[in-house]
Amino acid sequence: MNQVLVKICGVNSAEAFDAVVAAGADYLAFNFFEKSPRYVTPAQAAALSARYVGGPQRVALLVQPDDAAVDAVVAALQPDTLQLYAPPARVAELRARTGLQVWRAVGVSAQSDLPTGTEGADLLLIEAKPPKGSDRPGGNAASFDWDILAGWTPGFDWMLAGGLTPDNVAEAIARSGAPAVDVSSGVESAPGVKDAALIRAFIRAARG
C-alpha cells in the first residue's frame, strides 16, 4: 500500500512554513483568497517559499481567478500546482494556458455528487459542500459522511479535504480509502495560526 500523501494548506507565516517543511509534508499550499484568514499576497508567498529550496511541492489556491491574478501568482511564486475553485472549462483553460498541474475542488454530500471524471483537472479535491450562506466555496472546516467514498475507485487522482484533524484523519482514510489528505484549520491553534505540534501529529496520524 502506498503512503498517504499529505497537503498542509493556508501557510501564511515563517513559523508555519518552517514547521510544514520540517514535518515532511508532501504539499504546502498558499491561499490567495482575500476573504480567508490565511490569505497571502503573491509577494508574501514568494518570500516564504524562498526560505527553503526543495521540500514540499508548492500549491497556489485561487478562487474564480481572472488571468491577471493567475499571472501575478505564477510570476511571483512559480508554483508546482494551481488549486482552483472554478468551473471545469476554466480549469482546463488555465491548465493549457499556464502549463502547470491544476487541481479542482468538488463539494459533495451524497454518492450522487461524486464526479465520474476530472473534466480537465489533474486531481480533484473532494470536500463537503459549503454551508448555506457561506462566503467561502471551501475551507469551511466541514466534513461529510466519508462512507459515501467507500469502494469508490474513480480511476483518477483525488484528495480528501474538509474537517480533518490529527484526531480523525486516520479514521477518515480508513473509511474513505483516500490516497491523499488536505488540512488547514485542523492544524491551527486559532484561525490562520498554524501549530507545529498539530502539523506533526496530523502527518504521523495520516501515515500511520
Image (tube, helix red, strand yellow):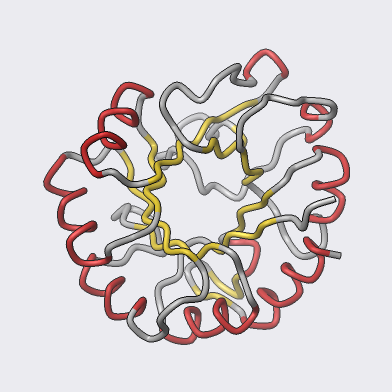
Q: Position of residue 47 (x, y in %)?
A: 28, 80
Seen in the image, is 132 located left or right of residue 177?
left
Residue in view at x 28 percent, y 43 percent: 99
Quarter where residue 186 is shown: bottom right
Q: Quadrant of the C terminus?
A: bottom right
Q: Position of residue 65 (x, y in %)?
A: 24, 41
Residue in view at x 47 percent, y 79 percent: 17
Q: Position of residue 3 (x, y in %)?
A: 77, 58
Quarter where residue 90 is shown: top left
Above or below: residue 100 compared with residue 14: above
Seen in the image, is 184 located left or right of residue 31?
right
Residue in view at x 57 percent, y 31 percent: 129
- The residue lying toward the viewer, choosing from 189 and 152, is 152
Above or below: residue 72 compared with residue 158: below
- The residue lying toward the viewer, choosing from 192 and 76, is 76
Quarter where residue 11 is shown: bottom left
Seen in the image, is 197 located left or right of residue 126?
right
Q: Residue furthest top?
A: 112
Residue in view at x 40 percent, y 45 percent: 101
Above or below: residue 176 compared with residue 113: below
- How many marks overall? 0
